[in-house]
Image (spheres, grey):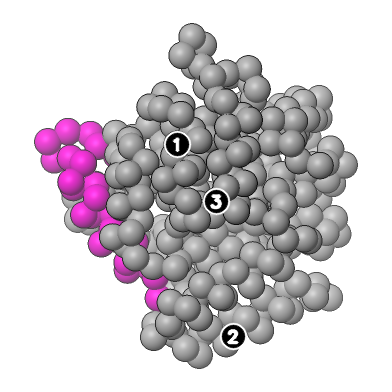
Amino acid sequence: MAILASDRRQFLLYSAASVVGTSLLPSIATQSAAADQSDLLPHPRKLYTAVKWGMIETDGSVAEKFQLCKDLGYTGMELVSPLDGISIAEITAARQSTALPVHGVVDMKHWSIRLSDPDEKVRAQGVEHLRQALVDCRAMGGFSVLLVPGKVSGAEETHEDVWTRSIQGIRQVLPLASRLGVRVLIENVWNGFCETPEEMRDYLDEINSPWVGAYFDIGNVRKFGPSEKWISVLGQRIVKLDVKDWSEKDGFCKIGDGDVDWPQVREALQEIGFSGWCTAEVNGGGAEELEDIHRRMTEVLEIG
């Protein structure tokens, strides 16, 4: 099987990183992550559109679904770990035949097997699932794993517990992340955790690793305050964006129909110098629905 030029560059990068191993210096790690991302981005200082795998509700092979998304204008895909019903070999073949990159994966076990669970054995399982997600991501050609770090659920799983336990778990996988060149990106969700931008900023700063950043969900935070404020506070900790909308009246809604102030969001993103992947996270469907989602996303973010 032929190796894509970008795959070869990534292989050489990760080979060098693995030699350094756990002693990888932050400055080198940051450069490695940036170099890895640049392989997946055709041009600097731009926004790129992707769709989450579970949103594609069409029949056909993996390659046919990749081709559909490319034809609709998407420039990348986000997959999942563990995979369900498809193989990494199929994804690799689809990626190569369509030249549509996989920019990352979602850890699909992070809600049910949480890093913040009161049971130490469950937390250990969560760490192992995160490790596997990092490996799967690298095998698919991506460079990030989306992670929900835990959930505030009661007296045995408080905000402080989620903070402490999740950081302990994440730190266990950082040597592997550095060797693979795959970052752990924390998504802001409705889990009772870090519901202000300052808390999320401080949480990421306590982890203090170039291999951990923010996967900022534009719509999720609108319930708690202006999305643009979060962007300004988190700044360059933001590595990727989930794109959705939310309104006080209707809850989650079609992109552009909610309360998110998109001009202010665009301005805030420009001010922090954001460039990278913007992945839709809304109800999916067939070709017609996916085309509408892409149109809405490119309009609100003014992606040319």
Asked whether, in this view, residue 270 is left or right of residue 125, the answer is right
Which residue: 50% across, 63% down?
Answer: 183
Q: Is residue 233 left or right of residue 277?
A: left
Nearest the viewer among 103 and 56 is: 103
How many neighbours does mark 3 have within 10 angstroms: few (below 14), some (14-19), or many (20 or more)?
some
Between label 2 and label 1, give the one nearer the viewer. 1
Which amino acid lies under the numbered mark 2 shown in the image of this protein? Answer: Ser
Residue in view at x 48 percent, y 9 percent: 249
What amino acid does circle 1 point to? Answer: Lys
Mark 1 to mark 3 CA distance (whole Å): 12 Å
Residue 15 is marked as: 2
Q: Is label 2 in contact with label 1 (beta carbons under 8 Å)?
A: no
Report which quarter residue 266 is drawn in: top right
Q: Is residue 208 magenta?
A: no
Furthest residue to the left? 155
Q: Residue at x 72, y 52 (%)?
A: 46
- Give the residue pinned by disc 1: 229
* Mark identifier at residue 272: 3
Magenta stretch contains residue 158 = yes
Residue shown at 44%/39% (left/top)? 230
Callout 3 secondary element: loop
- For the record, the magenta segment spans 151-175
Sequence-wise first label, 2 or 1: 2
2 versus 124 height, above or below:
below
